[in-house]
Image: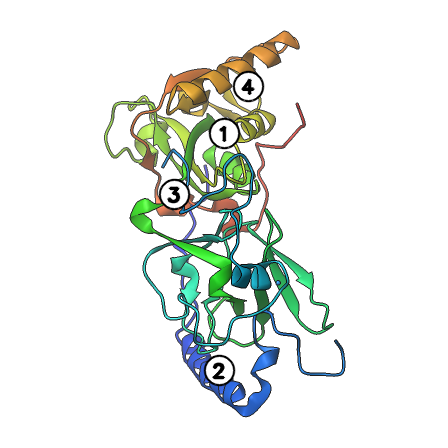
Amino acid sequence: MRERLPRRRLAPGLALAAGLVSAVALMGILFSGRAATEAPGTPAPSSTPTQKGLTTMPDQPKGGAYRQLTPEEERVIVHKGTEPPFTGEYDDHFAPGVYTCRRCGAMLYRSQDKFRSGCGWPAFDDEIPGAVKSVPDKDGRRTEILCSHCGAHLGHVFTGERLTPKDTRHCVNSISMTFIPEEKVKYGRAIFAGGCFWGVEYWLQQQPGVVAVTSGYTGGTKENPTYEEVCAHTTGHLEAVEVLYDPIRVSYEQLAKLFFEIHDPTQADGQGPDRGPQYLSAIFYADDAQKEVAEKLIADLKARGMKVVTQVRPAGKFWPAEEYHQDYYFKKRGTPYCHARRKLW
Protein backbone atom coordinates (compact mmCIF):
# COMPACT_ATOMS: atom_id res chain seq x y z
CA MET A 1 0.00 0.00 0.00
CA ARG A 2 1.19 3.50 -0.75
CA GLU A 3 1.12 5.80 2.22
CA ARG A 4 -1.19 8.77 2.00
CA LEU A 5 0.26 12.12 2.85
CA PRO A 6 -1.56 14.99 4.56
CA ARG A 7 -2.20 18.09 2.49
CA ARG A 8 0.65 20.57 2.51
CA ARG A 9 0.16 23.31 5.07
CA LEU A 10 1.21 26.89 4.62
CA ALA A 11 3.70 28.52 6.95
CA PRO A 12 2.20 30.37 9.92
CA GLY A 13 0.78 33.80 9.29
CA LEU A 14 3.38 35.28 11.61
CA ALA A 15 5.93 34.92 8.81
CA LEU A 16 3.87 37.29 6.68
CA ALA A 17 3.61 39.79 9.50
CA ALA A 18 7.36 39.64 9.95
CA GLY A 19 7.69 40.18 6.24
CA LEU A 20 5.67 43.39 6.38
CA VAL A 21 7.87 44.69 9.14
CA SER A 22 10.96 43.84 7.12
CA ALA A 23 9.50 45.57 4.08
CA VAL A 24 9.10 48.76 6.09
CA ALA A 25 12.69 48.41 7.22
CA LEU A 26 13.80 48.10 3.63
CA MET A 27 12.02 51.32 2.76
CA GLY A 28 13.95 53.01 5.52
CA ILE A 29 17.19 51.71 4.06
CA LEU A 30 16.20 52.90 0.62
CA PHE A 31 15.67 56.48 1.69
CA SER A 32 18.66 56.56 4.05
CA GLY A 33 21.04 56.50 1.09
CA ARG A 34 22.07 52.82 1.35
CA ALA A 35 19.68 51.41 -1.28
CA ALA A 36 22.52 50.52 -3.66
CA THR A 37 23.27 47.40 -1.61
CA GLU A 38 19.74 46.22 -2.42
CA ALA A 39 19.62 47.30 -6.06
CA PRO A 40 19.52 44.65 -8.80
CA GLY A 41 22.64 45.77 -10.63
CA THR A 42 24.35 48.82 -9.11
CA PRO A 43 27.77 48.14 -7.50
CA ALA A 44 27.71 48.35 -3.73
CA PRO A 45 28.99 51.67 -2.30
CA SER A 46 32.39 50.66 -0.94
CA SER A 47 36.05 50.87 -1.88
CA THR A 48 35.64 47.53 -3.77
CA PRO A 49 34.92 48.24 -7.32
CA THR A 50 23.14 40.13 -12.79
CA GLN A 51 -0.49 23.96 -23.55
CA LYS A 52 1.24 22.65 -26.50
CA GLY A 53 2.76 25.07 -28.87
CA LEU A 54 5.33 27.79 -28.30
CA THR A 55 5.57 30.59 -25.80
CA THR A 56 3.97 33.73 -27.19
CA MET A 57 6.36 36.65 -26.91
CA PRO A 58 6.79 39.95 -28.78
CA ASP A 59 9.93 39.79 -30.95
CA GLN A 60 10.63 36.24 -29.77
CA PRO A 61 14.01 35.02 -31.08
CA LYS A 62 13.90 32.56 -33.95
CA GLY A 63 16.24 29.63 -34.36
CA GLY A 64 18.14 30.36 -31.16
CA ALA A 65 18.93 34.00 -32.03
CA TYR A 66 18.59 36.62 -29.31
CA ARG A 67 16.18 39.53 -29.48
CA GLN A 68 17.83 42.80 -30.50
CA LEU A 69 18.20 45.04 -27.44
CA THR A 70 17.76 48.78 -27.11
CA PRO A 71 20.74 50.72 -25.71
CA GLU A 72 19.07 50.91 -22.28
CA GLU A 73 18.25 47.17 -22.30
CA GLU A 74 21.83 46.39 -23.26
CA ARG A 75 23.15 48.59 -20.43
CA VAL A 76 21.27 46.50 -17.88
CA ILE A 77 21.12 43.04 -19.46
CA VAL A 78 24.62 42.84 -20.95
CA HIS A 79 26.63 45.33 -18.91
CA LYS A 80 24.91 44.56 -15.58
CA GLY A 81 23.47 47.99 -14.94
CA THR A 82 20.32 48.76 -12.98
CA GLU A 83 17.17 50.78 -13.42
CA PRO A 84 16.24 53.41 -10.81
CA PRO A 85 14.00 52.10 -8.00
CA PHE A 86 10.22 52.44 -8.39
CA THR A 87 10.54 53.21 -12.12
CA GLY A 88 10.27 49.75 -13.73
CA GLU A 89 7.01 48.77 -15.42
CA TYR A 90 6.69 45.57 -13.37
CA ASP A 91 7.45 46.96 -9.90
CA ASP A 92 3.76 47.26 -9.00
CA HIS A 93 2.50 44.72 -11.53
CA PHE A 94 0.61 41.65 -10.31
CA ALA A 95 -1.46 40.37 -13.24
CA PRO A 96 -1.45 36.56 -13.67
CA GLY A 97 1.05 35.26 -16.18
CA VAL A 98 4.71 34.48 -16.76
CA TYR A 99 7.78 36.71 -16.83
CA THR A 100 10.30 35.77 -19.54
CA CYS A 101 13.86 36.82 -20.29
CA ARG A 102 13.74 39.91 -22.49
CA ARG A 103 16.78 38.78 -24.45
CA CYS A 104 16.11 35.08 -25.22
CA GLY A 105 12.45 34.58 -24.27
CA ALA A 106 13.02 31.78 -21.75
CA MET A 107 10.48 31.57 -18.93
CA LEU A 108 11.87 32.88 -15.62
CA TYR A 109 9.15 33.59 -13.06
CA ARG A 110 5.44 33.03 -12.50
CA SER A 111 3.23 35.78 -11.16
CA GLN A 112 2.14 33.49 -8.31
CA ASP A 113 5.67 33.86 -6.87
CA LYS A 114 5.75 37.66 -7.07
CA PHE A 115 5.23 39.71 -3.91
CA ARG A 116 5.33 43.30 -2.67
CA SER A 117 8.69 43.90 -1.03
CA GLY A 118 8.78 47.71 -1.02
CA CYS A 119 12.34 47.67 -2.36
CA GLY A 120 11.55 49.46 -5.64
CA TRP A 121 12.12 46.54 -8.01
CA PRO A 122 10.03 43.46 -8.89
CA ALA A 123 10.45 40.78 -6.22
CA PHE A 124 9.91 37.02 -6.47
CA ASP A 125 10.44 34.39 -3.79
CA ASP A 126 10.87 31.56 -6.27
CA GLU A 127 11.82 30.97 -9.90
CA ILE A 128 10.72 28.44 -12.49
CA PRO A 129 12.94 25.42 -11.69
CA GLY A 130 16.37 25.77 -13.26
CA ALA A 131 15.52 29.04 -15.05
CA VAL A 132 17.77 31.28 -12.96
CA LYS A 133 21.48 30.88 -12.23
CA SER A 134 23.09 32.36 -9.12
CA VAL A 135 26.75 33.47 -9.15
CA PRO A 136 28.90 35.47 -6.72
CA ASP A 137 28.76 39.17 -7.54
CA LYS A 138 31.98 40.98 -8.36
CA ASP A 139 31.41 43.23 -5.35
CA GLY A 140 32.22 40.21 -3.15
CA ARG A 141 29.11 40.60 -1.03
CA ARG A 142 26.01 39.93 -3.08
CA THR A 143 24.72 37.09 -5.27
CA GLU A 144 23.95 37.95 -8.88
CA ILE A 145 21.15 36.19 -10.77
CA LEU A 146 21.29 35.42 -14.48
CA CYS A 147 19.01 33.82 -17.05
CA SER A 148 20.35 30.27 -17.13
CA HIS A 149 19.58 29.99 -20.84
CA CYS A 150 21.39 33.04 -22.22
CA GLY A 151 23.24 34.54 -19.25
CA ALA A 152 21.30 37.82 -19.26
CA HIS A 153 21.75 39.87 -16.08
CA LEU A 154 18.52 39.93 -14.05
CA GLY A 155 19.49 41.41 -10.69
CA HIS A 156 20.40 39.92 -7.30
CA VAL A 157 18.96 37.43 -4.84
CA PHE A 158 18.74 37.98 -1.07
CA THR A 159 17.88 35.68 1.84
CA GLY A 160 17.40 36.16 5.56
CA GLU A 161 14.94 39.06 5.23
CA ARG A 162 11.88 36.97 6.23
CA LEU A 163 9.66 38.79 3.74
CA THR A 164 7.86 35.56 2.77
CA PRO A 165 7.78 32.02 4.18
CA LYS A 166 10.38 31.03 1.55
CA ASP A 167 12.74 33.70 2.94
CA THR A 168 14.04 34.53 -0.55
CA ARG A 169 13.86 37.70 -2.62
CA HIS A 170 14.84 37.77 -6.28
CA CYS A 171 15.30 41.50 -6.87
CA VAL A 172 14.91 41.84 -10.65
CA ASN A 173 15.12 44.70 -13.12
CA SER A 174 11.84 45.13 -14.98
CA ILE A 175 13.80 45.88 -18.13
CA SER A 176 15.37 42.41 -17.98
CA MET A 177 11.96 40.76 -18.40
CA THR A 178 8.92 40.62 -20.68
CA PHE A 179 5.55 39.78 -19.15
CA ILE A 180 3.21 37.34 -20.92
CA PRO A 181 -0.44 37.42 -19.73
CA GLU A 182 -1.76 34.06 -18.57
CA GLU A 183 -4.18 33.69 -21.46
CA LYS A 184 -1.33 34.13 -23.98
CA VAL A 185 1.18 31.80 -22.38
CA LYS A 186 1.40 28.50 -24.24
CA TYR A 187 3.60 25.78 -22.87
CA GLY A 188 4.91 22.70 -24.58
CA ARG A 189 2.80 19.78 -23.29
CA ALA A 190 3.71 16.12 -23.02
CA ILE A 191 2.02 13.10 -21.41
CA PHE A 192 3.96 10.00 -20.37
CA ALA A 193 3.00 6.81 -18.50
CA GLY A 194 5.75 4.61 -17.11
CA GLY A 195 4.66 2.89 -13.92
CA CYS A 196 4.04 4.63 -10.60
CA PHE A 197 3.53 8.30 -11.42
CA TRP A 198 5.42 9.35 -8.30
CA GLY A 199 8.74 8.24 -9.79
CA VAL A 200 8.05 9.50 -13.31
CA GLU A 201 7.04 12.87 -11.88
CA TYR A 202 10.20 13.03 -9.76
CA TRP A 203 12.61 12.52 -12.66
CA LEU A 204 10.85 14.81 -15.11
CA GLN A 205 10.82 17.57 -12.47
CA GLN A 206 14.64 17.45 -12.52
CA GLN A 207 14.84 18.40 -16.19
CA PRO A 208 15.78 22.05 -16.85
CA GLY A 209 13.05 23.73 -18.86
CA VAL A 210 10.21 21.81 -17.22
CA VAL A 211 7.78 24.25 -15.64
CA ALA A 212 5.33 21.87 -13.97
CA VAL A 213 4.59 18.14 -13.72
CA THR A 214 1.17 16.84 -12.67
CA SER A 215 0.44 13.25 -11.73
CA GLY A 216 -2.87 11.91 -13.00
CA TYR A 217 -4.82 9.41 -15.04
CA THR A 218 -5.44 9.05 -18.78
CA GLY A 219 -6.14 6.54 -21.52
CA GLY A 220 -9.40 5.17 -20.12
CA THR A 221 -13.11 5.92 -20.30
CA LYS A 222 -14.13 6.84 -16.74
CA GLU A 223 -14.57 10.56 -16.08
CA ASN A 224 -13.04 11.99 -12.90
CA PRO A 225 -11.52 8.65 -11.85
CA THR A 226 -10.27 8.15 -8.33
CA TYR A 227 -7.06 6.40 -7.36
CA GLU A 228 -9.04 3.50 -5.90
CA GLU A 229 -11.02 3.09 -9.14
CA VAL A 230 -7.89 3.08 -11.27
CA CYS A 231 -6.28 0.48 -8.99
CA ALA A 232 -9.42 -1.67 -9.30
CA HIS A 233 -8.81 -1.88 -13.08
CA THR A 234 -12.35 -0.73 -13.92
CA THR A 235 -11.52 2.53 -15.70
CA GLY A 236 -8.98 1.65 -18.39
CA HIS A 237 -6.79 4.54 -17.19
CA LEU A 238 -3.02 4.45 -16.73
CA GLU A 239 -1.10 6.32 -14.10
CA ALA A 240 0.56 9.11 -16.08
CA VAL A 241 2.10 12.55 -15.80
CA GLU A 242 1.36 15.73 -17.71
CA VAL A 243 4.45 17.85 -18.33
CA LEU A 244 4.32 21.57 -19.10
CA TYR A 245 7.64 22.85 -20.40
CA ASP A 246 9.39 25.84 -21.95
CA PRO A 247 10.10 24.94 -25.59
CA ILE A 248 12.94 27.49 -25.67
CA ARG A 249 14.90 25.59 -23.01
CA VAL A 250 13.97 21.96 -23.68
CA SER A 251 12.55 20.03 -26.63
CA TYR A 252 9.90 17.33 -26.73
CA GLU A 253 12.52 14.87 -27.95
CA GLN A 254 14.74 15.59 -24.95
CA LEU A 255 11.81 14.87 -22.63
CA ALA A 256 10.88 11.68 -24.49
CA LYS A 257 14.49 10.45 -24.26
CA LEU A 258 14.49 11.15 -20.52
CA PHE A 259 11.22 9.21 -20.21
CA PHE A 260 12.81 6.12 -21.77
CA GLU A 261 15.85 6.48 -19.51
CA ILE A 262 13.90 6.53 -16.24
CA HIS A 263 11.82 3.37 -16.69
CA ASP A 264 12.00 -0.05 -18.33
CA PRO A 265 10.20 0.18 -21.69
CA THR A 266 10.57 -3.59 -22.19
CA GLN A 267 8.40 -4.58 -19.20
CA ALA A 268 4.92 -5.52 -20.40
CA ASP A 269 3.13 -6.30 -17.14
CA GLY A 270 3.77 -3.13 -15.17
CA GLN A 271 6.86 -1.35 -13.99
CA GLY A 272 9.33 -2.70 -11.46
CA PRO A 273 7.48 -4.09 -8.45
CA ASP A 274 4.23 -2.37 -9.50
CA ARG A 275 2.22 -4.81 -11.61
CA GLY A 276 -1.05 -4.22 -13.38
CA PRO A 277 -2.50 -2.50 -16.47
CA GLN A 278 -2.45 0.94 -14.82
CA TYR A 279 1.36 0.77 -14.75
CA LEU A 280 1.98 0.09 -18.46
CA SER A 281 4.49 2.09 -20.49
CA ALA A 282 2.89 4.56 -22.92
CA ILE A 283 3.42 7.87 -24.69
CA PHE A 284 0.30 9.92 -25.40
CA TYR A 285 1.05 12.22 -28.33
CA ALA A 286 -0.63 15.58 -28.90
CA ASP A 287 0.17 15.89 -32.60
CA ASP A 288 1.89 14.16 -35.50
CA ALA A 289 5.24 15.71 -34.60
CA GLN A 290 5.19 14.14 -31.12
CA LYS A 291 4.07 10.82 -32.59
CA GLU A 292 6.96 10.89 -35.05
CA VAL A 293 9.47 11.56 -32.26
CA ALA A 294 8.10 8.73 -30.10
CA GLU A 295 8.15 6.21 -32.96
CA LYS A 296 11.65 7.27 -34.00
CA LEU A 297 13.05 6.74 -30.50
CA ILE A 298 11.34 3.37 -30.16
CA ALA A 299 12.76 2.28 -33.53
CA ASP A 300 16.21 3.38 -32.36
CA LEU A 301 15.97 1.32 -29.19
CA LYS A 302 14.67 -1.72 -31.05
CA ALA A 303 17.58 -1.43 -33.47
CA ARG A 304 19.86 -1.82 -30.44
CA GLY A 305 18.14 -5.08 -29.52
CA MET A 306 15.70 -3.77 -26.88
CA LYS A 307 12.24 -5.36 -26.99
CA VAL A 308 10.33 -2.14 -26.40
CA VAL A 309 6.63 -2.55 -25.57
CA THR A 310 5.86 1.15 -24.99
CA GLN A 311 2.49 2.04 -26.49
CA VAL A 312 2.13 5.17 -28.65
CA ARG A 313 -1.42 6.49 -28.34
CA PRO A 314 -3.24 9.75 -29.12
CA ALA A 315 -3.64 12.01 -26.11
CA GLY A 316 -7.08 12.26 -24.60
CA LYS A 317 -8.46 13.86 -21.49
CA PHE A 318 -5.94 14.00 -18.64
CA TRP A 319 -7.40 13.81 -15.15
CA PRO A 320 -5.16 15.18 -12.34
CA ALA A 321 -4.76 12.78 -9.43
CA GLU A 322 -5.66 13.58 -5.85
CA GLU A 323 -3.59 16.28 -4.16
CA TYR A 324 -1.72 13.86 -1.91
CA HIS A 325 -0.19 12.29 -5.03
CA GLN A 326 1.28 15.58 -6.29
CA ASP A 327 4.95 16.37 -5.62
CA TYR A 328 5.10 13.13 -3.66
CA TYR A 329 8.86 12.77 -3.31
CA PHE A 330 9.31 16.50 -2.76
CA LYS A 331 6.96 16.31 0.22
CA LYS A 332 8.38 12.99 1.40
CA ARG A 333 11.95 14.28 0.92
CA GLY A 334 12.95 10.99 -0.61
CA THR A 335 13.82 9.40 -3.94
CA PRO A 336 11.89 6.87 -6.06
CA TYR A 337 11.97 3.21 -5.09
CA CYS A 338 10.85 2.06 -8.55
CA HIS A 339 12.56 4.44 -10.97
CA ALA A 340 16.24 5.13 -11.64
CA ARG A 341 17.93 6.84 -14.55
CA ARG A 342 20.30 5.11 -16.96
CA LYS A 343 21.76 6.88 -19.97
CA LEU A 344 20.61 5.55 -23.36
CA TRP A 345 21.66 8.41 -25.62
Name the residue carrying label 1: 252
Q: CA distance from mark 4 to mark 2?
A: 52 Å
Name the residue carrying label 2: 22
Residue drawn at x 55%, y 45% is: 66
Dividing the image into 4 quarters, which one contains the C terminus? top right
Q: Helix, strand, or loop for circle 2? A: helix
10 Å neighbourhood of mark 3: few (<14), some, or many (≥20)? some
Q: Is residue 276 visible?
A: no
Residue drawn at x 68%, y 60% is: 135
Name the residue carrying label 4: 265
Amino acid type of the residue that numbered disc 4 sits on in the rendered structure: Pro
Q: How is the image coloured?
A: rainbow
- Sequence-first disc among 3 and 2: 2
Task: Pick out the residue farthest to the right.
Answer: 48
Q: Is residue 103 above or below residue 156?
A: above
Q: CA distance from mark 3 to mark 1?
A: 17 Å
Amino acid type of the residue that numbered disc 2 sits on in the rendered structure: Ser
Amino acid type of the residue that numbered disc 3 sits on in the rendered structure: Thr
Q: Nearer the viewer, residue 57 or 139?
A: 57
Q: Nearer the viewer, residue 70 or 122?
A: 70
Q: CA distance from mark 2 to mark 1?
A: 43 Å
Q: Helix, strand, or loop for circle 4? A: loop
Q: CA distance from mark 3 to mark 2?
A: 36 Å
Give me the disc on residue 56.
3
Task: Pick out the residue farthest to the front.
Answer: 71
